[in-house]
Amino acid sequence: MEIFALGEGSYSVDSSKQFIPFNPATDNAKDRPGSLFIHVNPFLVKTDRDLIILDSGLGLKDSSGELIIHQNIRKAGFAPGEVTLVLQSHLHYDHTGGLVVERNGKLEPSFPQATHVINKGEWEVAMSGKSSSYRKPIFEALEREAKIEFVEDNGEVRPGIHFELSGGHTQYHQVFLIENNGQKCFFGGDELPEPEQLLRKFAAKYDYDGKRAMHLREEYGTKASAENWACLFYHAKSTAIGYVSQQDDTFSIKPY
C-alpha cells in the first residue's frame, strides 16, 4: 500500500465561511480576527486493486486552470483518470470542492471513472440546501454524471475497505479503515483531523456532537496505537500521515 498527502495549503475561515489563502510565514493571524485557520490535505492511497481518493479538498486551480489535486496526483506518479474510488467522510465544502471541475461554464466530475462512496443521510442533508457548509451544485453535477454508491451504517465497500458511521462531526459522518498486504491506514475525516487533537481532550462547538467526537478521537487513537494504523490527518499543519503511540493516557505521533 502506498499513501500520499495531496496538500492544498493553509486558509483562514471567518463567519462568511469563505476560505482565504493564509501563508503562516508571511501573513499575520491578528489581521483576521474571528477566523479559524485550517490546512487542507486530501489523500491518495494505492492498493493492489484500487487507486483511492479520501476526501477531495477545495478544488482550487493553478494559473493554467488545472485542479491542484490533479497536479498532486500526477506528482505522486498517477493520472487522475486512474482513480477508481472516492471515499467521502462527509460533504462539507472544504472536503468536496475537488469532486468537480468547471469546464466551459459547466461543473463536471473531476474523477469520472471513479465510484464515489457517500453516506446516504449525509447526501440528503447536503441536497436539502439548508446549510451553507454544503455546496449543492457540486452534488447536482455528481448526480447527473458520476458513479455514486450510497452506504449506511457500517460495512465493507470492497474487500479490505471498511466504513463506519461515526456521527460526531456531522450526523452522518463516516470513517474508513483500509487493509492491504498486512498494512492498515485509517481516515477519520473531521473527527481525527489533526495530530494535535489527540494530545488534549475537548468538545468542539463546530461538531454535531462534540462529546461524541471527543470520545471517538480517544478511541481511534487507542486502536491506531494497538494495531499500528497509519493515520491520515486531513487538517494537519505538518504531519499529515503518522503512526500513533499511546502510553497510559498520553498519545504521541511519529511521521509516516
Image: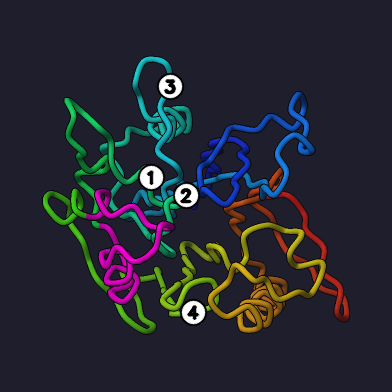
Magenta residues, as a range? 116-139
Q: Which residue is mark 1?
A: 97
Label 2 SS: helix
Label 1 SS: helix
Label 2 CA crowd tier, 10 Å (few <14, some 14–19, many 20+): many
- Residue 128 inside the magenta-drawn segment: yes
Q: Amino acid at mark 2?
A: Asp
> Residues under labels 2 and 4: Cα distance?
18 Å
Q: Give the residue drawn at x 45%, y 78%.
A: 171
Label 3 SS: loop
Q: Which residue is mark 2?
A: 94
Q: Earlier in the sequence, mark 2 or mark 4?
A: 2
Residue 110 location in percent, x, y?
Answer: 27, 40
Position of residue 140 relative to residue 199, above or below, is: above
Q: Which residue is mark 4?
A: 167
Q: Which residue is mark 3?
A: 62
Position of residue 114 relative to residue 208, above or below, is: above
